[in-house]
Amino acid sequence: MALKIGDKAPDFTLVSKGPDGPELVKLSDLVGKTNLVLLFVPMAFTGVCTQEFCDITSGIKDYEDLDATVIGISGDNPFAQEAWAQKEGIGIQLLSDYEHTVAADYGVAYDQFLPEANLIMGGVAKRSAFVVDKAGVIQYAEVQDHPKDLPDFAAVKAALQGLS
């Protein structure tokens, strides 16, 4: 079951590809500094995921003006994420949930990802958006069952506007 508004955001430590190699990023180190928008996507190098993160990158100032940091999370390894970011010009931090534990903790993991397309991969993250306030509490939660459906980013921004 996906997390909901009012739940404490589960802490995690994930890998990001930094300028000097892999870096560990811990949610609890980010909480309190800024509001967070956690965007889970199924996988790198796919059309909808690429479009989502490119659109977020081009409009990142809107989120910064709302005192928010946007973080993308997928089950891809950090080196694939870095190649994807460089190829497509994605400017948000990408975190690797390679073992799909965070997707499971947030309740957004598919049991079977697109079996009708012969992509039977358990644990892949559903396209999801969570707004986490500076106290580490979820203030917005949206989980899409179909991987082509994007979150309601106007609602994400509205949730951020309500935070101080």
Image (cartoon, rainbow, N blue to C red):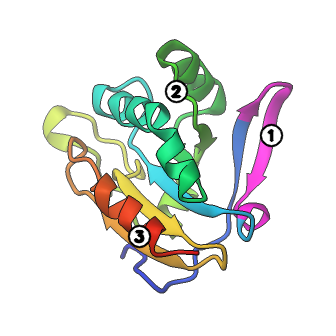
In the image as oriented, which residue stretches furthest toward the left?
116
Q: What distance separates the C-alpha of mark 3 from that of mark 1?
A: 30 Å
In the image as oriented, which residue stretches furthest toward the right?
20
Per the image, the residue denoted by label 1 is: 23
Q: Nearer the viewer, mark 2 or mark 3?
A: 3
In the image as oriented, which residue stretches furthest toward the top?
87
Is 18 magenta? The answer is yes
Q: Residue at x 58, y 37 (%)?
A: 92
Q: Nearer the viewer, residue 4 or 104?
A: 4
Is 10 magenta? The answer is no
Residue extent of the magenta highlight: 17-30
Say few, some or many: other residues with alpha carbon within 10 Å of mark 1 (under 14 / 14 to 19 / 20 or more).
Answer: some
In the image as oriented, which residue stretches furthest toward the bottom?
6
Residue 154 visible in the shown view? yes
User: Which image quarter is the N terminus in?
Assistant: bottom left
Q: Nearer the viewer, mark 1 or mark 2?
A: 2
Q: Residue at x 57, y 28 (%)?
A: 81
Per the image, the residue denoted by label 3 is: 159
Q: What distance separates the C-alpha of mark 2 from that of mark 3?
A: 24 Å
Circle 2: residue type: Ile
Circle 1: residue type: Glu
